[in-house]
Amino acid sequence: AQLLEEEEQFAHALKQEEASALKDMKILLQEEEEAAESLMSSSPGRVRDELSQMQVRVGSVTSDFKQADSEMDAMQHEVQSLQGEVAAQQDAHAKRDADWQRAGLEVQRRVQNA
């Protein structure tokens, strides 16, 4: 049960990271559109400055997105690992239950034969 809860937490964290990265990209695109409109009426020097600032922001957002993507990949791997552990535990529990059931039947058989 704890592994399933951890799996759900990882999945929720993945969704939050992805949503945050997408929000940042949307903000960046909006800023680019506003900057483009502003640049149309600006001097060449100002255009170069704005472009340089924009490139820095794009680089930063791109880096953040790549890092979030890497973290998502790691979290997905962890979720898969946890799912494997859960499946192994469920198999072990099922085997143990079957063993107890066989033992109980054997005890009943011996009691009846005694």
Image: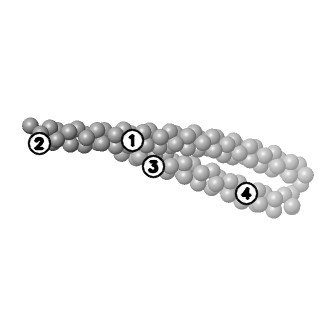
Contact check, label 3 and label 2, Cβ < 8 Å = no
Image depth: mark 4 or mark 2 in front: 2
| Amino acid at pointer 1 | Asp
The image quadrant that residue 62 belongs to is top right
The label number, if any, that marks residue 112 in the structure image:
2
> Outermost residue toward the left?
114
Say left or right for 71 vs 85.
right
| Amino acid at pointer 4 | Leu
Q: Residue at x 64, y 54 (%)?
A: 22
Q: Tell me which label, 4 or 2, sits earlier in the chain.
A: 4
The image quadrant that residue 1 belongs to is top left
Viewer-nearest residue: 79 or 113: 113
Residue 64 visible in rendering = no
Identify residue for label 1: 91
Q: Tell me which label, 4 or 1, sits earlier in the chain.
A: 4
Viewer-nearest residue: 81 or 36: 81
Q: Tell me which label, 3 or 4, sits earlier in the chain.
A: 3
The label number, if any, that marks residue 8 in the structure image:
3
Q: Residue at x 76, y 60 (%)?
A: 34
The image quadrant that residue 111 belongs to is top left
Identify residue for label 4: 29
Where is residue 70 drawn, in percent x and y? 63, 40
Picture layout, residue 45 above or below residue 36: above
Viewer-nearest residue: 26 or 1: 1
Q: CA distance from mark 3 to mark 4?
A: 32 Å
Image depth: mark 1 or mark 2 in front: 2
| Amino acid at pointer 2 | Gln
Q: Tell me which label, 3 or 2, sits earlier in the chain.
A: 3
